[in-house]
Amino acid sequence: MDEMTIPELRRRANHVRQHVLEMIHAGGSGHPGGSLSAVDFVVALYFRQLRFHPEDPKWPDRDRVYWSKGHVAPLIYTINHEAGYIPEGELCTLRQLGSVLQGHPAADKCPCLEVSSGSLGQGLSVAVGAALGLRMDGSDARVYCIMGDGEQQEGQIWEGVMSAAHFGLDNLCGIVDVNRLQIDGFTKDVMNIDPLPDKYRAFNWNVVEFDGHDMEACVDAFDAAKAHKGGPTVLLAHTVKGKGVSFMENVADWHGKCPNAEELALALQELREQEAAL
């Protein structure tokens, strides 16, 4: 796949946001807030960094992506559609009985997924194991793990962080979507995770912070992670939950809420106006 330019990446991100909202509306439920916040750096990852072949989902030399924040299934399915893995006709079947597009991703139904996900706090441990295994096999494939900031409160996160540094896994890149909100409100009020950069540095990770909606910054951050040697890198992407839709931005209620027909029409109008300005 040809490498996309920065303007092309911005337009692709806008299209992804529109597809995400249309999917959730068609399915009658889903998670728009965290899907929209992660769009820009995910587009930069898939179309400027990853090595993959959609016609051969299990190509041994592919880079691996582990979606630890699996509740953003609409984004996961949309980006894999844009990458050539999922036919467009499937997108409107989100959460329907018999659909391959489950409310939380199921790897046995979607070959483009490395592992099923949904329960938070587990993806990084799986990614650490994959990165270690690839290095033992002599592979130069890279491993990426996409996490939420609220997720830093849960599961095996810090066991995975410790293990990755212990084994010096410089083929591993963690990405944290720091949108500051989770289902119950601001992360700092639910269970404060700050100072997150210092915590990763204390575990001997290379830390890169950037504006997760600045496409050039997203591309530079992934380049910096790839260039770092001797240990793992975490990218802390500072984002806005619900990014791109004025009435969804920074509103915790949109963590897992379906827009009605009027709200969808307004959101799409805003996004198309943004697209025209690109």
Image: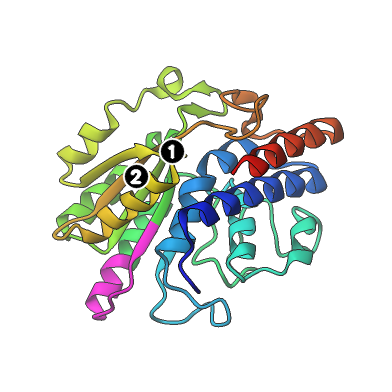
Q: Which residue is label 1 attached to? A: 151
Depth order, front residue of 189/2? 2
**Dot 2 and dot 1 residues touching (CB under 8 Å):** yes
Question: What x and y, as percent, mark residue 125?
Answer: 35, 55
Query: What number is the disc on residue 171?
Result: none
The reply to whether residue 2 is visible in this rendering is yes
Is 152 positioned to the left or the right of 17 in the image? left
- Residue 276, compared with residue 77, is above or below; it is above
Could you tell which of marks 2 and 1 lies nearer the N-terminus? 1
| Image quadrant assignment for residue 111 | bottom right
Q: Secondary structure at mark 2?
A: helix
Within-10-Å neighbours for mark 1: few <14, some 14–19, many 20+: many
Left-right relation of 82 to 121: right
Residue 131 pos. (x, y %): 30, 66
Task: Point out the stretch of residues depicted in magenta.
Answer: 131-144
- Labels in figure, total: 2
The residue positioned 15% from the left and 55% from the top of the image is: 166
Which amino acid type corresponds to the residue marked 1 in the rendered image?
Glu
Is any part of residue 31 visible from this angle?
A: no
Which residue shows up at 68% across the image and 24% down it? 247
Q: Among all residues in the image, which is located at the extreme top?
A: 189
* Distance between the alpha carbons at the discs numbered 2 and 1: 8 Å
